[in-house]
Amino acid sequence: MSSVTVRVPAKVNLQLSVGPLRDDGYHELATVFQAVSLLDEVVARPGAGGVRLSMTGEGDGALPLDGRNLAVRAATLLAERAGVAADVDLAIAKAIPVAGGMAGGSADAAAALVACDALWRLATPREDLVELAAELGSDVPFLLQGGTAIGTGRGEQLTSVLSRGEFHWVFALANGGLSTPAVYGECDRLRADRAVPDPYVSDMLMQAVRAGDPVLLGKALHNDLQPAALSLQPALQQVLDVGEDFGALGGLVSGSGPTVALLARDAEHGLDLAVALSSSGTCRSVRRATGPVPGARVVG
Ligand code: C5P
C-alpha cells in the first residue's frame, strides 16, 4: 500500500463533571463527549525504518516530533503489540488547536493507530485498538469512536449516546495553551475546602442531546474545570461574554481550555457569532464546526 489517509475529529465536552482525585493521580469523571468537524488529517506512508513524523498547520514547530509525540507513541505501541517493525512516515496536517482542550494530541494518536493498522494490514480487532488507545491517554478511545458518548472512569470508559440532528458550534481559539495537569491541579486547589461529590451526568443534558434540542443543550452545558481555566486565564471570560452578547445558546470552556465553545442556533447564527468574535479582538482565531461526526477513519 502506498499511503493511507485518516481524518480525525476534535472533541468538546458538553458536560465535564470532575469527581475526587484518585490514588493513581487521575480524577474520576462523568463526561459527555461530542466529536466535532474540526479535523486533523494523518497520512501514513511506508517508511525507511522507524517512525518519522512531520506536522503542518496549527502549532507548527511547537510540538516535539520524537517519541514524546503521542502519534509516534501510538505507532510504536501498535507495532510492538502486533510484533511488526515500526516502519512508517506520518504526516499530520493539524486544524485542531494544540493544548487547546479539544484533545488534538489524543486525536492524532487515534488517527495514527487507525492509519498504521491499515498501512501494515494488521486488521487489529476493534477492542484491541480501543485498549491501546486507553493506554495512550484518557481521551484517545473517544476519538476512535466519535459521535456522542458518556465517558466515565478517567474518561476512557465509553457508552454511546443516540443524538438527533446536528449542533452548530463556534470555537474561539486562544493565544497559547493550557496544560491539562495544571488545570486539574488548579481545580483541586480551588475546591480544597469542600467535599467533592461523585461525578454525574445531568438528565437535562441527555434529554437535550437525544431530542436534538439546541436551546435546552445551551442551558445544560457545564464544565467543572471552567473556574480553574478562568483562574489561570481570566481573559477567557471576555470570550464567554461576547458569546452571550451575540445570542449564543450557551458557552463554556472546552475541556481543560483555553478554547471556548459557543453553541449557535443554526448555521447562519454560527456565522454571525463567528464574525462577532473575530472582530471582538478577544481571541486568536475562530472556527465553525458541527457535531456529532464520526471518529478516526480512513478516507479516499
Ligand atoms: O490521560 P491523559 O494523559 O490525557 O491525561 C493528562 C493529565 O490530565 C493527567 O496526567 C492528569 O493530570 C489529568 N487528568 C486527570 N483526570 C482525568 C484525566 C486527566 O486528572 N480523568
Image (cartoon, rainbow, N blue to C red):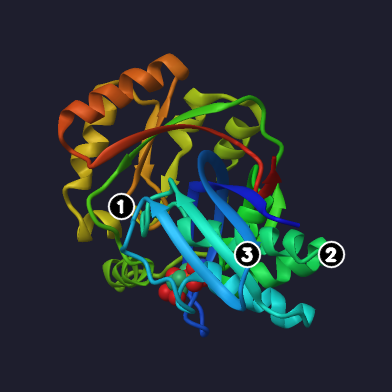
Which residue is disc 3 drawn over? 156
Image coords of residue 67 (percent x, y): 49, 79
Whether the residue carrying mark 3 lies under 8 Å from ligand 1 is answered with yes
Whether the residue carrying mark 1 lies under 8 Å from ligand 1 is answered with no
Nearer-the-camera pick, 161 or 102: 102
Are discs 3 and 1 less than 8 Å apart at CB? no
Which residue is disc 2 drawn over? 125
Residue neighbourhood size for the residue with mark 1, other residues' Cα within 10 Å, grouped as few (<14), some (14–19), many (≥20): many
Res 114 quadrant in image: bottom right
**Residue at mark 2 to residue at mark 1: CA–CA distance:** 35 Å
Q: Tag 3: residue type?
A: Glu
Nearer-the-camera pick, 128 or 298: 298
For the question of whether residue 141 can be seen, the reply is yes
Query: Going from the N terminus, do you reach mark 3 or mark 2 first?
Result: 2
Q: Could you tell me which secondary element the residue under label 3 belongs to?
A: loop
Image coords of residue 154 (percent x, y): 56, 68
Vertical relation: 245 (above or below) 40: above
Vertical relation: 138 (above or below) 59: below
Residue neighbourhood size for the residue with mark 3, other residues' Cα within 10 Å, grouped as few (<14), some (14–19), many (≥20): many
**Residue at mark 3 to residue at mark 2: CA–CA distance:** 18 Å
Q: Is residue 293 left or right of residue 283?
A: right
Query: Going from the N terminus, do you reach mark 2 or mark 1 first?
Result: 2
Quadrant of the frame with the N terminus: bottom right
Identify the residue at horizontal 68%, vertical 57% (top origin). Answer: 158
Which residue is disc 1 drawn over? 258
Identify the residue at horizontal 54%, vertical 56% (top origin). Answer: 107
For the question of whether residue 27 can be seen, the reply is no
Identify the residue at horizontal 56%, vertical 62% (top origin). Answer: 90
